[in-house]
Amino acid sequence: MIELGRWAPASIYTADDDGSQLKEAVVTVLREFGLEADVEKPAVRGSWFQRLWARGRDSEAVREHLATLERALELEGLGKRQADIDKAKAEPVAALLTVVKEQTNAVVRLGSIILIKTEGNVVVWTISEMEAAVMERTSHIPRDPVTALKFLRDDSQGHGQTSLDHPDRDALHE
């Protein structure tokens, strides 16, 4: 889990022109898990990208809420619901995944959790502190689902991209 204070970074990307429905679903999930969308940067249109910061009571609350959210996303993504998953928490996660599935391509980051949709597939991933740092400093990764998947795949296979250079687009289609 990423070492967080009261704040957790979040970002939303969709290839569609209007991401307001996706943002609404993200904000609902954050709220349900005890966090609130606070500092928002303006949305970038063409496709749609927006960064925001989620805030909790304290750093321990942020870690606990993100861990619970991560587990709920994993369970929902696998289609396996457990009896101990509270309906109030499962519904906003399911709503977020429904909205993500409606997007052509999307990247949603909630702290150390990243959802990526490309070519009809949705992937949920937990990112490391190093991956989070690279994603924060590199604006093209959270804005391109293929680049994000390649970055995470390469990093998990031990030959991650440590520079902040944009990856070779031809290498993405290997």
Image: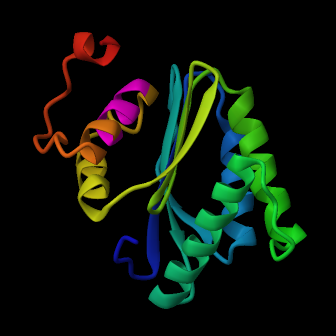
Q: Nearer the viewer, residue 156 or 101?
A: 156
Percent from the top left, x then y, of residue 33? 69, 73
Q: Position of residue 100 (x, y in %)?
A: 68, 36
Instruction: Give above or below for 171 relative to 55.
Output: above
Image position, residue 163 (x, y; %): 10, 41
In the rendered image, which quarter contains the N terminus? bottom left
Q: Count every numbered label the image shows and give the total.
A: 0
Q: Nearer the viewer, residue 100 or 160?
A: 160
Is residue 61 toward the left or the right of residue 156 in the image? right
Q: Residue at x 63, y 66 (%)?
A: 71
Q: State the residue at coordinates (33%, 38%).
A: 153
Considering every residue shown, the one lying at the far left of the view is 163
Magenta run includes residue 151 = yes
Q: Is residue 139 above or below residue 174?
A: below
Rendered view: 73 above or below 170: below
Which span is picked out in magenta? 146-152
Direction from residue 121 to residue 76 in the image, left or right: right
| In this view, 109 is above or below 141 | below
User: In the image, is residue 111 part of the stretch drawn in magenta?
Assistant: no
Measured as percent of width and height from the top left, residue 159 is found at: 16, 40
**Residue in the image at 56% along x and 88% along y:** 57
Q: Quadrant of residue 82?
A: bottom right
Q: Quadrant of the C terminus?
A: top left
Query: Toward the viewer: 109 or 87?
Result: 87
